[in-house]
Structure formats: structure tokens, C-alpha cells
Image (tube, rainbow, N blue to C red):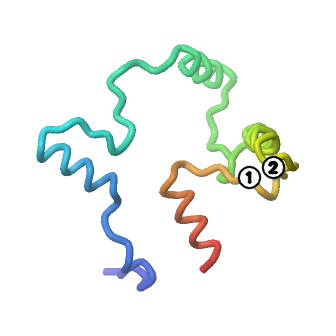
């Protein structure tokens, strides 16, 4: 059986796994991650439908689509009061766990 690299030994169970287990054990509402009990906003549903109808059915680039990175850069440029380069300074991740991991691995 293949063993994980030693550098991963410091990582334990994710907080989401632990919170999900505790919520089930204590019959509690799980606030540890996204489990909404309400319908999504209509504008989000409409955007998803428009994307499907436009045949946007392929995986996006791993660091985010150019349009999304430009929008993020524009927003943060106004917040920071300086130009943020969407090609060199913006990376989109699939969640906070991935973002933290990528950030930490950048310095190892």
C-alpha cells in the first residue's frame, strides 16, 4: 500500500469532517459547512441556467476564468488603491481549504 508523504503527517482530519461527525452524534444543526435549508436565490439559478444554455459545460481553468479573475482584480484594485494584475496576482480556488493549502505550499 502506498504511504502518504511524511510532510503530510501533521495534517489531521478536516474540521468539516469533525463538525459533520459531531453534528450527527449530537443531532445538531451542522453550521460547519454549506448545508442550506432554503432555496437558492433566483438570480443564481438564472445564471446557472444561462451557463447551461450557452454550453458552458467544460471544466474552467484551474486558476479561474479570465473574466472572473478580471472582475476580482477590479474589485480588489479599488479596495487596495492600486492596480491588481489578474494574470499574476489572482488565483481562484474551489474553497478555503484549497486556498490555504496552495498558499502554504507556495512557501515550502
Asked which quadrant contains residue 50, the reply is top right
Binning the other alpha carbons within 10 Å of mark 1 as few (below 14), some (14 to 19) or many (20 upward) gives some
The furthest residue to the right: 83
**In front here: 65 or 95?**
95
Question: Whole-percent x and y of residue 15?
Answer: 33, 57
Would you say 47 lies left or right of 77 here? left
Residue 97 sits above or below residue 31 on the image: below
Left or right of 90, for residue 81: right
- Are circles 2 and 1 on residues that touch, CB within 8 Å? yes
In the image, residue 23 above or below residue 52: below
Q: Marks 2/1: CA distance?
A: 5 Å
Residue 63, image x and y in percent? Answer: 68, 52
Q: Residue 32, located in which quarter of the rendered image? A: top left
- Image quadrant where one finds the C terminus: bottom right
Task: Tell me which residue sits at (26%, 56%) in the image.
Answer: 18
Residue designated by label 1: 90
Q: Name the residue under label 2.
A: 86
Helix, strand or loop status at disc 1:
loop
Image location (x, y in percent) of residue 106: 64, 72
Amino acid at each position: 500500500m502506498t504511504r502518504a508523504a511524511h510532510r503530510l503527517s501533521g495534517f489531521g482530519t478536516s474540521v468539516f469532517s469533525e463538525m459533520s461527525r459531531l453534528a450527527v452524534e449530537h443531532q445538531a444543526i451542522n453550521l460547519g459547512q454549506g448545508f442550506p435549508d432554503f432555496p437558492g436565490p433566483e438570480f443564481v439559478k438564472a445564471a446557472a441556467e444561462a451557463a447551461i444554455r450557452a454550453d458552458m459545460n467544460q471544466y474552467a481553468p484551474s486558476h479561474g476564468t479570465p473574466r472572473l479573475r478580471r472582475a476580482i482584480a477590479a474589485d480588489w484594485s479599488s479596495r487596495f488603491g492600486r492596480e491588481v494584475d489578474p494574470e499574476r496576482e489572482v488565483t481562484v480556488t474551489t474553497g478555503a481549504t484549497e486556498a490555504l493549502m496552495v498558499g502554504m505550499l507556495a512557501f515550502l
